Amino acid sequence: MSSIEIISLVVTVLCLVSFCLAFTFLFRHYYKSETEKVLMGKEDKALLEDIAIDTRRSEDKKRKILSLVGKIAGYVVLAVVGVFFVMTLISRFSSGALFFGDKAYLVIATGSMSEKNKENDYLFDSSLGLDDQFDAYDMIQIQKYESEEDVDLYDVVAYKDKDGTIIVHRIIEIDADGYITRGDANAASDTGVTYDGHLAYKDILGRYDGSRIKGIGSIIVFLQSNAGIITIASILYCFLMFDYFSSRYDKAIERRKTYLLKQVPFDPNDENDLEKLDNSFKQTLTYKDKEYDLLPLAGEESKEDTEQTENDPEREDEKK
């Protein structure tokens, strides 16, 4: 890695770690605050209203089914992203080839097979039908040969060069010494560049079978990069943290609902019961063996109430 790439990677790591820490802090603070409000009883009226609504809609299962489907879909997406992420990592650390049985999937990094070079006359012979070109960042499928006898002239094959890099080019010559390959867009063969002399059968991974997905390789190349790995790991972390905190909040709500139904003679099926609910939160403060019910201040009305209380003669007597 060059110094610029190292600096870019360090900056990426610092930014994403900072984002994850900020995300964790903010969501932890928010859900902790909301959970405490629920457990302290500040949301009791809203919870009882939810119970009433859920009870009246119990016959209509559509809402519950949609909620369950949404949650399952979220986990499915997470699982797919996770599997896809793992596959890209395996592909990266296995020199770019990910085999499933006798098939493998490769991402094309260059445009050496994207067009027909005029120097390659055989490509313009309509009887051969050599129109199986592909572009950079396409994902292609290759299939292993069963034996060396199955290798044909003009097959597009994937092979490892002398540095271990996977190349996907066309076989343009076959002789007793092996194979000569060339990219369709190139005017020169690979011999002396990616291998010495001839390509050996043992270095061929398989042949291109015509199956490809256009453009998806750019995503995979990013995911295989250091920045991509760190980014996806950060996203998965944030998703799991969000699910963790929201699950704890949901459990607090269920606990409080269960407690309310045991303590309050509330009939969810009686619409008039909702009108009788009053959830004005009060805080009791004890001072010199006397209890004071204090209300939270909110807006100008609470300010006026405070001023009236401070000017109350009885309050002045208590101060004396």
Image (cartoon, rainbow, N blue to C red):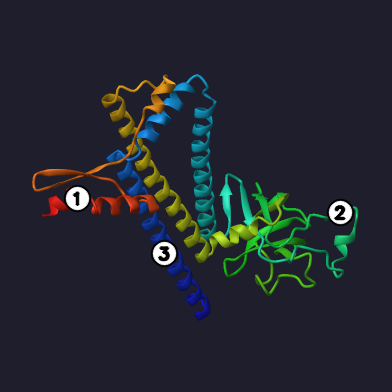
The earlier-in-sequence mark between 3 and 2 is: 3
Mark 3 residue type: Val
The earlier-in-sequence mark between 1 and 2 is: 2
Regarding mark 1 in the picture, which secondary structure is present there?
A: helix
Q: Which residue is drawn at the image coordinates 19% and 50% (left, top)?
A: 313
Question: What number is the disc on residue 17?
Answer: 3
Residue located beneath label 1 in the image: 313
How far apart in space, not on screen, are marks 1 and 2 (Cα)? 106 Å
Q: Nearer the viewer, mark 1 or mark 2?
A: 1
Task: Using the rendered image of the protein, determine whether residue 221 is visible from the camera's viewpoint.
Answer: yes
Looking at the image, which residue sits at the far left?
288
Regarding mark 2 in the picture, which secondary structure is present there?
A: loop
Mark 2 residue type: Leu
**Residue nearest the viewer, comparing 177 with 34:** 34
How far apart in space, not on screen, are marks 1 and 3 (Cα)? 58 Å
In the image: residue 71, left or right of residue 277 = right
Please say if the residues under marks 1 and 2 sit with CB atoms less than 8 Å apart.
no
Within-10-Å neighbours for mark 2: few <14, some 14–19, many 20+: few
Regarding mark 3 in the picture, which secondary structure is present there?
A: helix
In the image: residue 178, left or right of residue 123 = left
Residue located beneath label 2 in the image: 128
Mark 1 residue type: Pro
Q: Position of residue 310 (x, y in %)?
A: 24, 54
**Residue nearest the viewer, comparing 96 with 129:** 96
